Amino acid sequence: MAQLEGKRAVVTGAASGIGRAAALLFAGEGARLVVVDQAAEELGELAAEIEEAGGSAVMLTGDVAEEATAERIVAACTGEFGGIDIYYANAGISGEMLPLTQYSTEAIERVLAVNLLGPMLAIKFACPAMIEGGGGSIVMTASVAGLGGNAGPAVYSATKAGVINLAKSVASELIGTGVRINAICPGLIETGMTKFLFDHARERGTIDKVGQLNPLARHGAPEEIAAVALFLASDASSYVNGHAIVVDGGLSASLPFAPAHVLRADTKGYVKR
């Protein structure tokens, strides 16, 4: 049986990257979906792809940082499918690659709105509907940048730290409701948000070095994050609650090191390379 058979789900930021991969995976596992993004053309292509594969997808365009949109998303899912079981609050923006001192106040507010207010509004409107239906699972995309410094711009990183704490704090607020809430902390994943980095590496012929500092010595793919989102959305994670699961190839599990001087395993044991 498909892992999400009969489930009603929302995926935001669904037009590309991690959101698109998650929407396709959720649909393939039997979920009926409301897919949300501001990129209408790409979102329409996604919805059509899901429908052509035999799934069910309702597309909704809007800004997740607006209360009216957040309310409309939940209403669309409950109205179309009779309830809501899963809400994957994935939509996010990186903001400008600038030091905090060079940000305009408006730019700061925009990153805060999409990355942190967006998930808060998702929780605000999804939780009552989930509780009425007997429970559900909320998943949010955070980042390894929310775990420590120097993994992204300060504004972006602060919002992702907020998402991590949001999962922990709201889990306690939802005690006894049957609603679980967790976050995912992706490492370096090739998406539209990181396209500039990957394009630059390919131009220089150094794409094989992207992600080399983690123990798996590679970058990740959206499908690898989507697989973790599926786990958290499904009943397979029924006792996982209030956590931020790190998916970064092991990067944040170790102190910084130079790859040429680390002990590595070969057939004769560990050798220094």
Image (cartoon, helix red, strand yellow):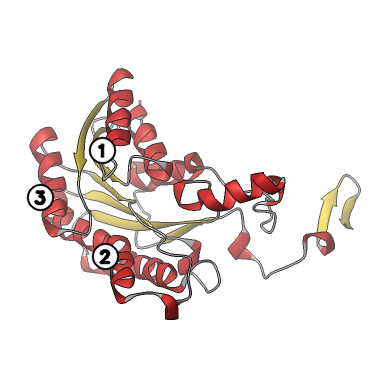
Mark toward the start of the polypeptide (3 vs 1): 1
Which residue is identified by label 3?
A: 132
The residue at 35%/57% (across/down) is 182
Which residue is identified by label 1?
A: 40
The residue at 61%/50% (across/down) is 200
Q: Secondary structure at mark 2?
A: helix
Q: Is residue 1 above or below residue 153?
A: above
Amino acid under disc 1: Ala
Amino acid under disc 3: Glu
The residue at 66%/45% (across/down) is 203
Based on the displayed image, in which of its 4 quarters is residue 25 positioned? Answer: top left
- Could you tell me which quadrant the C terminus lies in? bottom right
> Distance of mark 2 from mark 3, alpha carbons?
28 Å
Q: Is residue 92 above or below residue 73?
A: below
The residue at the far bottom in this view is: 101
Amino acid under disc 2: Ala
Side of 10 relative to 128 (left or right): right
Which residue is identified by label 2?
A: 113
